[in-house]
């Protein structure tokens, strides 16, 4: 394993193969709304995210919000339900670079959610 500490005299890495990582973000991405019913829908269009996306089901929901990777996820299908269930007040954090990759469907109308992440500049 190589030594990646900085040389105090030059602030250069001792290992020339070491690469700096820098992420630039301009603010906070936030989206709130009601999860679709019938067919799952993406949270949003292509927005570049710098950090993980957290989705929280509203504390006052009477049903559930289901999270998945495509419009084919299902809710209320018993053992064949394919979405990841979020009950009222529960949250899930995903490492995705766009909310367009995450689909939601509600178990009934008016199942609200909020999504938040760091947005790329």
Image (cartoon, rainbow, N blue to C red):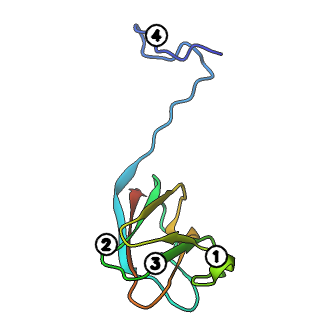
Instruction: Give SS at disc 4.
Output: loop
Tell me the crowding category of disc 1: few under 14, some 14 to 19, or many 20 or more residues within 10 angstroms, Cα based: some
Q: Is residue 107 above or below residue 14?
A: below
Mark in the foreground, 3 or 1: 3
In this view, which residue lies farthest toward the top?
9
The residue closer to the viewer here, 64 or 78, is 78
**Dot 3 or dot 2, earlier in sequence:** 2
Instruction: Provide residue 110's location: percent of width, then percent of height.
Output: 38, 88
The residue closer to the viewer here, 36 or 52, is 36
Q: Can residue 73 be seen in the rendering of this structure?
A: no
Instruction: Give SS at disc 3.
Output: loop
Instruction: Provide residue 20's location: percent of width, then percent of height.
Output: 51, 31
**Dot 3 or dot 1, earlier in sequence:** 3
**Figure disc tally:** 4
Which residue is labeled 2 in the image? 59
At a point 33% along the width and 60% down the height, the residue shown is 28
Tell me the crowding category of disc 3: few under 14, some 14 to 19, or many 20 or more residues within 10 angstroms, Cα based: many
Tell me the crowding category of disc 4: few under 14, some 14 to 19, or many 20 or more residues within 10 angstroms, Cα based: few
Mark in the foreground, 2 or 4: 2
Disc 4 to disc 1: CB gap under 8 Å: no
Q: Is residue 20 above or below residue 51?
A: above
Which residue is labeled 4 in the image? 7
Mark in the foreground, 3 or 4: 3
Which residue is labeled 1 in the image? 70
The residue closer to the viewer here, 44 or 66, is 66
Which residue is labeled 3 in the image? 64
Cα separation between marks 3 and 4:
54 Å
């Amino acid at each position: 394993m190589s030594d990646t500490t900085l040389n105090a005299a030059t602030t250069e890495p001792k290992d020339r193969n070491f690469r700096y990582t820098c992420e630039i973000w301009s603010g906070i991405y936030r989206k709130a709304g009601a999860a679709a019913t019938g067919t799952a829908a993406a949270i949003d269009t292509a927005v570049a995210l710098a950090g993980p996306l957290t989705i929280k089901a509203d504390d006052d929901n009477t049903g559930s919000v289901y999270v998945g990777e495509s419009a084919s996820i299902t809710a209320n299908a018993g053992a064949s339900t394919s979405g990841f269930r979020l009950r009222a007040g529960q949250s899930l954090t995903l490492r995705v670079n766009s909310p367009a990759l995450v689909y939601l469907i509600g178990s009934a109308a008016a199942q609200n959610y909020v999504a938040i992440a760091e947005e790329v500049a």
